[in-house]
Amino acid sequence: MVHPEGTESPPGLQQYRPQGPARIVVLVSGSGTNLQALIDAEKAGPAFGGTIVAVGADRTGIAGLERAAQADIPTFALRVKDFPTREAWDRALRDKVAEYAPDLVVSAGFMKLLGPDFLAAFGGRVINTHPALSPSFPGMHGPADALAYGVKITGCTVFFVAGGVDDGPVIAQAAVAVEDGDDAESLHERIKTAERALLVDVVGRLARSGWTIDKRKVILP
């Protein structure tokens, strides 16, 4: 990977240091509550360290795009069904995101797997969240799977996307206790609260100081 100064990182080592306020593209598929947390953090002042330059979606007419529009953030939507193949959609998404020259791409409730063309363009700069403590309980039903397994502690993970399902290098995690009487919905709600706070903290730290990925180890200055 070549970082902004133009020097090549050693094999297995990826380094990135945004120059000035980090440019952030956020991808959403639904209500955009994580997006709103990021918008609020940016509005709170320059200490956040980044600017949301665009919000993209895989569908139209969703609250996440409305939140972005209300904050005067440019938006776009690319629906998979409007393209002949999933690969064509992935390339179109790559090209659209590239127009905004992002330092960081945040998948905030984006319900599509990003393909190899997209990750080849933004590898090591795409982050996502998972409502469990990775590598435990990957997939869409993390809270329910944790509850069914009988764990006493679960939580949320922010990680760099690496092409698999919730299996990229871990940036940060937060623990959430499983309470007596929890069902999947009540547990997931508490996880989402922790997830929003963790995502804002991680995005701010990445935006302000950059990061290093050494194989699977993420190092934040």
Image (tube, rainbow, N blue to C red):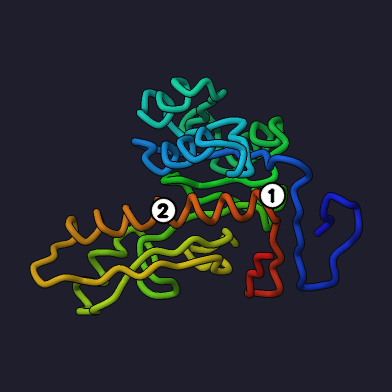
Residue 28 in the image: x percent, y percent? 45, 38
67 or 100, nearer to the observer: 67
Residue visible at 60% across and 52% down in the picture: 126
Residue visible at 84% across and 56% down in the picture: 2
For the residue carrying disc 1, how many other residues have a C-alpha within 10 Å: few (<14), some (14-19), or many (20+)?
A: some
Nearer-N-terminus badge (1/2): 1
Q: Is residue 59 above or below residue 34?
A: above
User: Left of 57 or right of it: where is 131?
Assistant: left
Query: Would you identify the image quadrant in which residue 110 lies?
Result: top left
Residue visible at 54% across and 42% down in the picture: 86
Which structural element holds mark 1?
A: helix
Residue occupied by mark 1 = 122
Residue visible at 49% across and 60% down in the picture: 158
User: Left of 133 or right of it: where is 48?
Assistant: right
User: Left of 11 or right of it: where is 42?
Assistant: left
187 or 42, nearer to the observer: 42
Residue 11 in the image: x percent, y percent? 82, 72
Query: Would you identify the image quadrant in which residue 96 lies?
Result: top right
Residue 167 in the image: x percent, y percent? 51, 68
Label 1, label 2: how far apart the Cα atoms are = 24 Å
Residue occupied by mark 2 = 197
Which structural element holds mark 2?
A: helix
User: Left of 25 or right of it: where is 189?
Assistant: left
